[in-house]
Amino acid sequence: MASARKPKREGNLKGSPTPVGTALQQLAHALGIAKTLSQYDILTSWEKAVGAPIARVTKPLRIENRVLYVSVGSAPWRAELTMKRLEIIRKINRFAGTDVIQDIRFR
């Protein structure tokens, strides 16, 4: 009776498989799109990035040249958020895992 041979498992150089998340991050860096993906993640995960109170009164519009443009519902909120601008930038960059945002413009 012939025994069935198992195919060799391919993985990284250490012999263990590479996690999918790690492989995708490596691919994004290799393709030069990691920064763009981080920016997209900020826009699509806005509430997670800035928190529910800020997300309720704002809407991220776009990111251009490391400047985030955000729509704000009222002038008093715009003034409040402008004063907390540096804190919000730190929070967003911490969420992204890198310094993606340099400035914020509230409109």
Image (cartoon, rainbow, N blue to C red):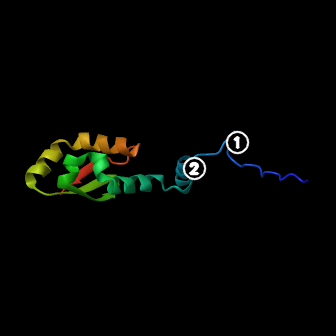
**Label 1 crowd (10 A; few <14 / some 14-19 / many >=20):** few
Q: Which residue is mark 1?
A: 13
Three-letter code for the amino acid on which mark 2 is drawn = Ala
Q: Count of labels shown?
A: 2
Q: Which residue is mark 2?
A: 23
Image quadrant for the C terminus? bottom left
Residue at the farthest right position:
1
Q: Position of residue 106 (x, y in %)?
A: 19, 54
Nearer-the-camera pick, 54 or 68: 54
Residue at the farthest front position:
1
Quarter residue 73 falls in: bottom left
User: CB under 8 Å between callouts 2 and 1?
Assistant: no
Quarter residue 17 falls in: top right
- Give the residue at x 17% y 54%: 57
Three-letter code for the amino acid on which mark 1 is drawn = Leu
- Give the residue at x 41% y 52%: 38
Nearer-the-camera pick, 7 or 75: 7
Q: Position of residue 4 (x, y in %)?
A: 83, 53
Q: Position of residue 97 (x, y in %)?
A: 41, 42
Nearer-the-camera pick, 96 or 51: 51
